[in-house]
Amino acid sequence: MAEAILAKAHVHNIVIEDVLCEVSEGLEIDEQVLESLVQLLRPAIDDVVAVCIDRDRLHSVVARQIKMLSAISPLAGAAFGLFASNLAAGL
């Protein structure tokens, strides 16, 4: 049952924006760029939330997503890494 609930869990955009702002360390990010980064991160965050109960899968999904996102945007990769770290710490 918990897996079904987590599979449908939704991370609000404000949480994604928060980790982006935290890792950007004062870098001015245009609203349009911020929205683009949120949309880039959304599938990766949805994937990691869906598997967060399974620690083995969690680590492999996080590693795969960080590698993919970092290749596209180092900022997105860092933000996802922070999100995943915070998520794992809360489990």
Image (spheres, rainbow, N blue to C red):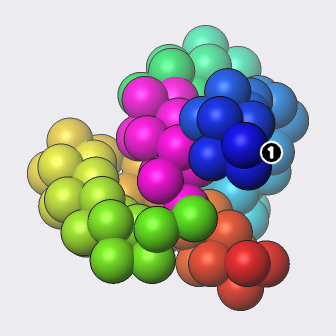
**Res. 70 in view:** no
Residue for point 55% across, 61% down: 52
Q: 59 above or below 72?
A: below
Q: Main secondary structure of the magenta part?
A: helix
Q: Report which residue position mark 1 lands on.
A: 15
**Which residue of the protein is positioned furthest toward the bottom in this rendering?**
89
Magenta stretch, residue numbers: 41-52
Residue 47 lies in the magenta-colored region: yes
* Front residue of this view, candidates 56 and 83: 56
Residue 58 appears at what percent x and percent y? Answer: 41, 67
The residue tagged with tag 1: helix, strand or loop?
helix
Q: 40 above or below 28?
A: above
Residue for point 53% across, 36% down: 46
Is the residue marked by circle 1 packed among few (<14), some (14-19), or many (20+) residues within 10 Å?
A: few
**Res. 36 in view:** yes
Residue 75 lies in the magenta-colored region: no
Residue for point 45% across, 77% down: 55
Query: Where, by quadrant of the figure, is residue 32 drawn?
Result: top right
